[in-house]
Image (tube, helix red, strand yellow):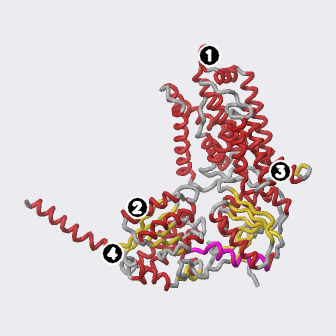
Amino acid sequence: MRRFLLVLLLNLMVFLVLPSFAENIIKIGVIAPLTGSQAIIGTNVVNGIKSAVKRINDAGGINGSIVKLVIYDDRNIPDEGVAAARRLIYEDKVKVIIGSIGSSVTLAIQQLTMRENIFLVTPVSMSPALTQRGDKYFFRVTATAEMRQRGFVSFVVENLKPKTIAYLAVNDDLGRSEVEAAEKFYAELKGPTTIFKAFFDPSESNFISYLTKIKVLNPDVLFIVADSVKAATIVKQAKTLGIKTTILSSADAATAQFLQLAGDAAEGIYFPLDWSPDFTDKYSREFLNAYKEDYGTIPDTKFAVQGWEAMWIVAEAIKKAGGIDNPDKLRTAFLNLTWIGPRGTWKFKENGDPIGISTFVVIVKNGKFERVLTK
Amino acid sequence: MLLLLQTIVNGIVDGLAYSLMSSGLTLVFGIGRVINFAHGELFTLGAYIAIILVQNHFSYLFGSLISIILVGFVGVIIETLVIRRLRRLGASIWSPFLATLALLNILQSLYLIIFSPNPYILNNPFAYVPINIFSITISGQDLIILIVFLLSICLLNWFLKKTKYGIAMKAISQDREASLLMGINIENIYKLTWFLGAMLSALAGILLTPKSTVDPYIGRVALLKGLCVVIIGGLGSIEGAILGGIFLGLTESLASVYLLPTFKDVFGYLFVILILLLKPRGILGKSLRRG
């Protein structure tokens, strides 16, 4: 009998204690590719998010609540992303999801989050479609292709003054949207005429036939859109063929990995860049110190900073809204917040896109990214 | 004119690369009657082992040789542990097909765990050195591919035509039952076939990856292009594989320069379908017999 009472008492205690614990936890869902071809980016983003959560919790959490992450892998496959979102929403009962990387995955997840009034914050996806669906609870903590291209294009037109341009881009939403944005702005500024445009399969590693044509056409500039690995292969193959054209790249290849893989073929290539681990401002140092403390190294890619910023911005919005239970309050908090991070000052428009994240122009010199100062 | 010549040279160079990708596949199919879906993973394994050895101060040449032999033994292990057991069970032709497909996934996951998805470079001092002949440019690696590929094909041809084991292999590919009755040790010949086939897959990986990078997913292209070449050339025919590769390379190269560059692969696959429609057994295909 005594034992029975003891068990009863213990059970009661557990019941009494548990809810009070639960009240002090804010669960945030994270969906990113942790295996598969985009795993480097996914892992970097998640590392950035984890570093931010650690700092937020060390400082007492959000309004006294501890942040707990529930992380699922989507392997950069839309179906897997939706399955992960389903688990987060129906089993883990999260109200806010940070994810994902590939736009196609994020678009698929958004179908579900829109229907269930769940907050979706993407740290990386750039597709314009994401903010054109009228999703009230969607925010993008990254510059779109248009934002990244606008400044870069005017730099190219004013300083390099090309008459002709060739495009070589990966055949997915990244390549298509970057080239579309670049062409639009070049046309607006009466810039170079397009004399060659090709989109290659994401698994392609042989660019010789495209480059042969480009060599003969001899454009003033060549714009490439690819991840670091493919971009490195392209510039190395271009060098072998003896192509002397000035190469411009999208920001995606502006990584330490690209420099390492491309070697001296990287010299003289221009990039638009929103952030690099070489940045020495206060906010970048804060991030880099945190990252070094947690993982012992600086991040492989700039995507880690995107995870870091997305998590801080989400935390800031939840703090302002006083919790995550009222999505409309949370939306208002997002629209009214101003947060300064390594990439600049973040504010958001009604459609969920950021306002005024600027990019710098960098050039590779002696194996390093060097900022190009314009007049 | 220069563009046309360069495009044709590019096509032939790419074509030889494709033939190389398919040679291991062709050999194992021609004699073992197994479409080895793990072929691309052996290709990748060859590159990875060579990278480890080169990083540990072996030369490219020596590291490659060791890697090729090691992967050859992996082929023997696959044959002994998986394919032979299925054969003894009297399993249908689908069983080895599914088993090698499973191996593909197992090996790919292993590479992910061991090497991470980050790309590696197989360092070779000649890889990107331009070689100019009458203003036509090929890379140093292309020249190496050309020489090594021709050498290995000659060697393979000599082996198949002149040696006891080679002749036994050909005999089995023509008629398994009769070969058995003639007293050929068929199990040993299958082992040998897988040994050589896996070595060719690894050789392809080692020769082709210095042109780009190595990650756990590169086997997919090797498998897909290898299968295309095998279809064009005719299953099981080494000469067909060479011709098929060159045809595929030329089609892609010419189409991407003179037609639509974005549809380079599309033209390649259209060509495969066209061959299937016109010559269902491939350019040099022999009729298939139940082995």
Q: Does B176 appear above or below A288?
A: above
Q: Is residue B92 left or right of residue B273?
A: left
Q: Does B42 appear above or below A210?
A: above
Magenta residues, dominant SS class? helix
Please rate how many residues cluster around mark 4, counting C-alpha atoms within 10 Å: few if below 14, some from 14 to 19, many from 20: some
Where residue A132 sits in the image (x, y, percent)?
56, 74
Q: Nearer the viewer, residue A160 or B279?
A: B279
Q: Is residue B229 magenta?
A: no
Chain under numbered label 1:
B
Residue at x-position 76% and y-position 43%: B15
> What amino acid type should be assigned to the residue bearing mark 4?
Asn
- Secondary structure at badge 2 equals helix
**Quarter of the image where one finds residue B200:** top right
Q: Which residue is mark 3?
A: B7
Farthest front residue in view: B277
Mark in the foreground, 3 or 4? 3
Q: Which residue is mark 1?
A: B178
Q: CA distance from mark 2 to mark 4?
A: 22 Å
Q: Is residue B134 left or right of residue A97?
A: right
Q: CA distance from mark 2 to mark 1?
A: 59 Å
> What amino acid type should be assigned to the residue bearing mark 2?
Arg
- Residue A60: in sight, yes or no? no
